[in-house]
Image (cartoon, grey):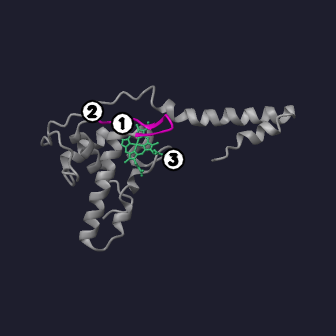
Amino acid sequence: MKRTPIPVSIRFAASRRVAARASAVLLALCACVAAPVAWAHGDVTPQAVDTSALPKLGEQWRAENPFRGNETAVKIGTSAYNQNCARCHGLEAISGGMAPDLRKLDGECATMKDAGRRAACVKEIDDFYSSTVRAGRSRNGAVYMPPFEGVMSQEAVWSIKAYLETRREKPF
Ligand code: HEC
């Protein structure tokens, strides 16, 4: 069975000072765990993204970004990113440390010399990207990132990826 550190502090709880310190630690822990939940409230109303200038993709999610290098998509993705992702992932995709830096998303692919392997790597990251954005990220009941499935269209999600590819830390 996994041992938790809590019984240890209870053992020492005979001393009032230690007990007070333990509860301060507990309070700090609670604040820490509660923080991601707070992000899911307040100014999180997803902003509508107008993708009417792009071809419709239908219901089926693509395994790979159909808008890679599409300039219209990049433009739409820039504004969609700023309105829906930047408050956590940073303006211009430069993370302030609160959430992963999305300029590095497919950074490992950049180092691949073989074009075929690199394309396969980017495709894999596309899939990881779209499933993460659709499902969001939650752990132990805390929402780190809200799900965008049903909130943002597939066209908008891939436009954001097309934009992020213009922000790569290591351009291809
Ligand atoms: C409320 C804050 C928040 C918003 C809004 C948000 N994210 Fe996130 N995102 C996070 C956090 C925090 C993580 C890391 C979660 C974890 O630790 O599991 C993350 C993880 C990710 C990942 C996985 C990165 C990796 O390397 O594992 C991707 C991709 C991503 N977000 C894309 C987006 C996109 C695109 C948007 C906008 C449509 C967005 N996020 C909106 C907070 C947010």
Residue at the far bottom in the pictured view: 113
Give the residue number, with chain letter if any, for mark 2: 150
Q: Is residue 90 visible?
A: no
User: Which of 18 and 81 lies nearest the eye of the viewer?
Assistant: 18
Q: Given contact means CB atoms under 8 Å apart, are the residues at marks 2 and 1 in contact?
A: yes
Q: Nearer the viewer, mark 1 or mark 3?
A: 1
Question: Disc 2 to disc 1, how far (Cα)?
Answer: 9 Å
**Mark 1 or mark 3, which has the lower sequence index?**
3
Q: Is residue 160 above or below residue 14?
A: below
Q: Is residue 143 above or below residue 67?
A: above
Q: Which dot marks residue 85?
A: none
Name which residue type carries label 3.
Answer: Gly
Left or right, 89 with respect to 61, comes to: right
Callout 1 secondary element: loop
- Magenta region, residue range: 137-149
Residue carrying label 1: 147
Relative depth, front residue between 147 and 41: 147
In the rendered structure, find residue 97 and report the number of the disc placed on it. Answer: 3
In the picture, measured across the screen, residue 19 lies left or right of residue 144, that is right
In magenta segment, residue 143: yes
Give amino acid for label 2.
Answer: Gly
The answer to the question of whether label 3 and label 2 lie on touching residues, with beta carbons closer than 8 A, is no
Q: Is residue 112 above or below residue 96?
A: below
Instruction: Tell me if 34 is positioned left or right of 93 in this view.
Output: right
The structure residue drawn at horizontal position 23% and vertical position 52%, both measured from the top left corner, is 63
Q: Tag 2 or tag 3, which sits nearer the N-term?
A: 3
Rendered-image quarter of ligand 1? top left
Give how far across and how far down residue 2 sits, in percent: 63, 47
Q: Position of residue 111 (x, y in %)?
A: 36, 69
